[in-house]
């Protein structure tokens, strides 16, 4: 049997890294002898997270264009030229059978070089509104795996396959883990647990909101697991107390979801897909600072099907307390949101994406 070689590229945020790792893990299950190489951006979090998952990674000197005039933008042409040259070397030396891109700047030069060299390429687009890198790459890609419908306006229709977003496999069976989760986080089983997720780096406005509401949460007899992000941990760790647990990052996401009753979350594509699978009542607070406001679009795709609630950052001061309290008091509403968001889950996403990759290499 042929020994296959796969290059995966994606990074910058957890939303691009974890799907790539999930795809690699599924490929490894099917092809235990395969060789894997990840390619990321030199100073981004993938340089730690990928080796932790047991894979080799090479870094490119690449970064995105800033929206304002800056030294970084003036450096961009040099970084791009350097990354294209290095990508060419990587593809030539490693000789991959397929190159898979999950978004982020590093996947741009690598997939461009791969398709120029005649290597089949697969794009996995997590968002309901694609980023510029994937839009540019889509013209030459062989297959584009998407998580939302109606993306024909961005990508060539005949290349699109609706698969959903890869999620961690341990999230598929959290039902039986509640007792273990309560013990793991040392929670009171008789209190409601609120989970706050600000994304892997953190969310300033969400953190400010939670800090301001801590007194109110205490009076509502709620315990909180608050993932404030690594950028903000030093600032908020002082709030660690019996009923408030502050984390920079949570390793056991399966247990934290199993323990929680209500979730407040950003609306990055991976988070949205995970929340569909775990089926908890959610209030989305999308980040307004991402390209093309795609977090709001991701959240709206769930809210429009009555699967979650949505608050814009600009509404938090006036609306949050009312919306949260109404949800907390209404168990029927919580159950309905849970049921509706679960209907939108695509638990077989990783397998479906790998099926497409296998079809390509068997051609």
Image (cartoon, helix red, strand yellow):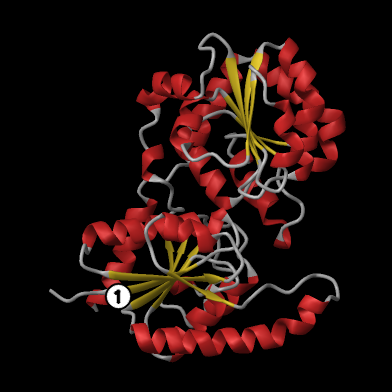
Quadrant of the drawing holding the C terminus: bottom left
Q: Is residue 213 visible?
A: yes
Q: Quadrant of residue 293?
A: bottom right
Q: Nearer the viewer, residue 131 or 234?
A: 234
Q: Is residue 115 visible?
A: no
- Is 137 rendered above or below residue 358? below
Q: Is residue 35 left or right of residue 271?
A: left
Q: Position of residue 210 (x, y in %)?
A: 75, 30
Q: Position of residue 303 (x, y in %)?
A: 63, 39
Q: Nearer the viewer, residue 55 or 331?
A: 55
Q: Quadrant of residue 14?
A: bottom right
Dot 1: within a 10 Å radius of its alpha carbon, few (fewer than 14), some, or many (20 or more) residues?
some
Q: Is residue 201 left or right of residue 168?
A: right
- Is 8 rendered above or below residue 183? below
Quadrant of the drawing holding the N terminus: bottom left
Q: Give the residue drawn at x 48%, y 71%.
A: 157
Residue indicated by mark 1? 5
Q: Is residue 208 left or right of residue 359?
A: right
Q: Give the residue drawn at x 57%, y 83%.
A: 83
Count of number-bearing discs: 1
Residue found farthest to the top: 190
Q: Nearer the viewer, residue 66 or 184?
A: 184
Q: Give the residue drawn at x 20%, y 67%.
A: 33
Q: Give the residue drawn at x 48%, y 83%.
A: 140
Q: Position of residue 227 (x, y in %)?
A: 63, 37
Q: Quadrant of residue 127?
A: bottom right
Q: Nearer the viewer, residue 57 or 175?
A: 57
Q: Position of residue 35 (x, y in %)?
A: 29, 71
């Amino acid at each position: 049997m042929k020994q296959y070689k796969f290059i995966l590229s994606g990074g910058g945020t957890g939303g691009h890294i974890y799907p790539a790792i999930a795809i690699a893990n599924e490929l490894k299950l099917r092809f235990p002898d395969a060789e894997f190489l990840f390619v990321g951006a030199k100073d981004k979090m993938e340089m730690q997270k990928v080796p932790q998952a047991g894979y080799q990674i090479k870094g490119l000197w690449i970064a995105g264009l800033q929206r304002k005039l800056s030294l970084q933008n003036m450096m961009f042409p040099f970084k791009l030229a350097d990354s294209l040259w290095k990508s060419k070397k990587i593809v030539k030396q490693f000789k991959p059978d397929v190159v898979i891109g999950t978004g982020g700047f590093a996947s741009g030069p690598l997939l461009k070089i791969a398709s120029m060299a005649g290597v089949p390429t697969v794009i996995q687009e997590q968002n309901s509104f694609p980023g510029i890198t994937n839009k540019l790459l889509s013209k030459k890609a062989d297959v584009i795996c998407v998580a939302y419908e109606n993306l024909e306006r961005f990508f060539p229709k005949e290349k699109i396959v609706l698969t959903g977003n890869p999620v961690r496999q341990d999230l598929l069976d959290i039902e039986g883990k509640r007792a273990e989760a309560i013990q793991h986080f040392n929670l009171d089983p008789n209190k409601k647990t609120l989970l706050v997720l600000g994304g892997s780096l953190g969310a300033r406005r969400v953190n400010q909101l939670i800090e301001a509401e801590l007194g109110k949460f205490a009076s509502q007899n709620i315990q909180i697991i608050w993932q404030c992000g690594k950028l903000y941990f030093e600032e908020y760790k002082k709030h660690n107390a019996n009923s408030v647990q502050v984390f920079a990052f949570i390793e056991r996401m399966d247990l934290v979801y199993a323990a929680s009753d209500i979730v407040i979350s950003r609306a990055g594509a991976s988070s949205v897909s995970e929340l569909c699978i775990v089926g908890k009542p959610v209030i989305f607070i999308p980040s307004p600072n991402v390209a093309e406001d795609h977090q709001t679009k991701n959240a709206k795709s769930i809210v429009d099907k009555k699967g979650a609630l949505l608050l814009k950052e600009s509404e938090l001061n006036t609306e949050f307390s009312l919306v949260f309290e109404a949800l907390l008091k209404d168990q029927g509403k919580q159950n309905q949101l849970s049921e509706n968001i679960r209907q939108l889950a695509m638990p077989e996403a990783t397998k479906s994406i790998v099926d497409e990759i296998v079809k390509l290499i068997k051609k």
